[in-house]
Amino acid sequence: MSDDNWPSPMPRPGDDDDPGAEASVFAVFAPPEADEPPETATLPEADEPSETATLGAEPSGGVLGVRRGSPTASGVGTAILSAGGADHLERPRRRIGPLSWIGAVLLGVWLVAMPLTSSVTELRQNTQIIVMVLAVLGVNVATGYGGMISLGHGVFVAVGAFAAAYAVDDLALPWALSILAGTAFAGVIGALVGLPALRIKGIHLALVTLGLAIVFQPLAKRVPAFSGGVSGRAVGAELVPPSWFGTSRWTEGLYHYLICLVVVGLAMWLTHNIINSRPGRAMRAVRDNDTASAVYGVNLVASRVSTFAVSASLAGLAGALGIVLVPFASQESYPFQESLVLYATAVLGGLGSLWGSVLGVAIREVFSRIGELLGDVSGLGPLGEFLRLLDEEQFVFGVLLVALTFVFPRGLIGMFKRRQDDQAPRADRHGARA
Amino acid sequence: MNWNFEILPDFIFNGLRDGAVYAAAALALVLIFKATTLINFATGELAMLGAFFVYVLNIEQGLWLWLSIAIAMLISAAIGAAVERALVRPFDPADHLPVVLITLGLFLIINAVAGDVWNYQVRRVNDPFGAFPSWVPNGSELKTSSEGTIACLNNADGELVEVAAGTADAQMCEMVGRTFFEVIGARLHYRTIGTWIALALALIALAIILGKTKAGLAFRAVSSNTESARLVGVNTGRTLGFGWALASVFGTLSAALVAPALGGVNPNMMLTILIYALAGAALGGLDSLGGAVIGGLVVGLIKSVLVSWFGVVVLGQAYFSILQLAMAFLLILIVLLFRPAGLFGTRRIERV
């Protein structure tokens, strides 16, 4: 993201002091471009430099002033505009902490070793976990980068699954197109939900999205053509691996695993690029101070709606991949608690960081496994009663959520970041303004 | 179009009864929002826990129903205050996100614990307003005919049926006969009147607590301006704990009132009620106590009259009955979009 990559209509520091409406539209609709070499996407903290740029690369206080909520238009202006330049300064100093290395190595080892050592069922379950990263990432885009709390992302996962099932069965489309259709449909629904977010902010938006999540399940029961009604719909089509890949159940599972892994990787890479492109910077500027960014030519409507669309289509993609793995979609699988869990997983891992979403899902899985193990211990009297509770994933997760909110208010990814985070004022620690 | 006005009063009464429950739950939300501008997403689950306390004390321990409700309210108040002290106070009140997370975590924990302890079956509870006390004159006249049968109003479809006197059916019939008045051709159930009276008494108590006691004065000071209240020596932390306790009492009241109508208590009983209560609170303005009451009643009326009566009876579209929840959601959306302060809330002026 060097200065040269800035397309001309965006005002640069001291360049053009009259950013018109035209410029703003251009700014937001500019196609997402890869501002960074793609290979950085595979490194932990690849999104760090740009994050640093908005967080605190301006020690003179312009950016921090905005974040303290006593904003000046020029503050955010500098935030937007300095992204390029500041990043330029930061890049040579990018460090990857030892913890990040350990995490990356562990993840790599797990990704290779897991399919080789798992049974067919375990492989399928683990692939579902990997796919879940996308839904969490969707929440992260809306809340961490866009500053809009969404407690209703389970709805988009469900919509993506239903739309993909509809496309592949009723429309007899090929799988690739069906998955895309599910993703796109969820994106459209997300854009619709994003519209109210133009006016409703903070905790009020949380309320609206929670309402959406609760209302969805009873409504979905009544649209049997789409959702299969109360009992759900079985997906007839199967994604069969080519014959050279082998025909056993295990190779089929492996095939699905590889496809999902590639799609998840691609989606993360794409998200990374979107976030670090012009619309992505606009997104973060709007999060930090919408009025100031509007003054500086960001089109708020387009920015908020497209942020929500991107975030919903990530969740929809997770839903569509889900029916590849388990050929069944039912509203039963998407109770509204699932939406809360998605949101909480995103926050647990750390908002405003791609790898935070991966970490959130990983931690959640690790703890629910530990809970299961402890839950199986029996015959300890009242202590056993308590341990039995640990079998309930929902309970373990709730406790984890409360505990980690105390210990790591910035999410677990905060452990990995050795930066001047402490300078970030408190109200913005979680990425969103409320 | 079938403008069946004859049964409209029935729908109005039902709507206002449900509305009273939503009003109590909305008050639980608003009491917390008013003081801290936080929405306690665990309101419904704390209320559900209160209803389970009533169940345990009344059904399992055999205590008098009203005593059980009173004790359950006290326990809930203690839990509310404890939650505030342990989980909410450590966080900066200006920062909403940690508290959203904490209340969401509480939501999941309480729901899972209740599911583990009482599992997810519906457990029958005693109705505090099942039948009129014996000193109330009978609602409908039951006359024994010469053949030894009585004409009995069938509660389900309102038809007169003949049952032999002295049988279980006849006793049932007398019970049913004692559960409602006939008012302008509609049935005003004892449960409906009782719910209204309970809400009215609770509101009077709340008005006295907030208006006449020192703790109430402190609460009003803190909700009006936390900083200034602290400067003049109000113990804001303790006052907020007091607010959470009050809110939990109202939550428990709503859950205890609604449980018999739902057929009993179960861990998911408050989910839909939470949505209606949120709609009521949003409509009234999230920081207005009176607004919450009126908002809750209006939501009950809209649900019953607009959706059930107009949609199902007048338009003859049965699918309207499933739109009740969607209606509540739409109401939240519309109010927040076009009038974020609700009907009676304080308008916020955003300084840029």
Image (cartoon, rainbow, N blue to C red):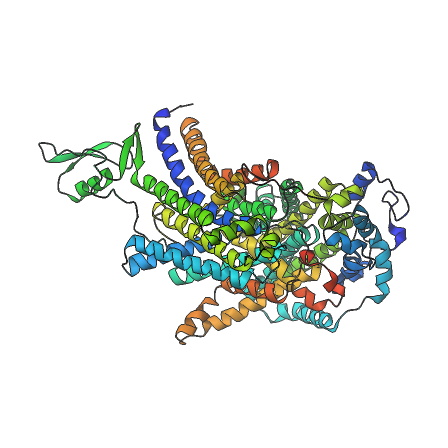
Q: Residue at x 89, y 53 (%)?
A: A3
Seen from this angle, which residue lies furthest front?
Answer: B232
Residue A424, position in %: x, y? 73, 60
- In the picture provided, is A431 more to the left or to the right than A94? left
- In the picture provided, is A264 more to the left or to the right than B84? right
Q: Residue at x 72, y 51 (%)?
A: A69
Seen from this angle, which residue lies furthest left?
Answer: B146
Residue A142, position in %: x, y? 67, 50
Which corner quadrant holds the N terminus of chain B? top left
Residue A228 in sight: no
Q: Residue at x 58, y 46 (%)?
A: A209
Residue B82, position in %: x, y? 48, 62
Residue in the foreground of this view, choosing between B104 and A76: A76
Which corner quadrant holds the C terminus of chain B? top right
Rendered view: B311 above or below B80: above
Rendered view: A282 above or below A122: above
Residue B342 in sight: yes
Residue B269, position in %: x, y? 42, 50
Q: Quadrant of residue A348?
A: bottom right
Residue in the foreground of this view, choosing between A288 and A378: A288
Q: How many marks?
A: 0
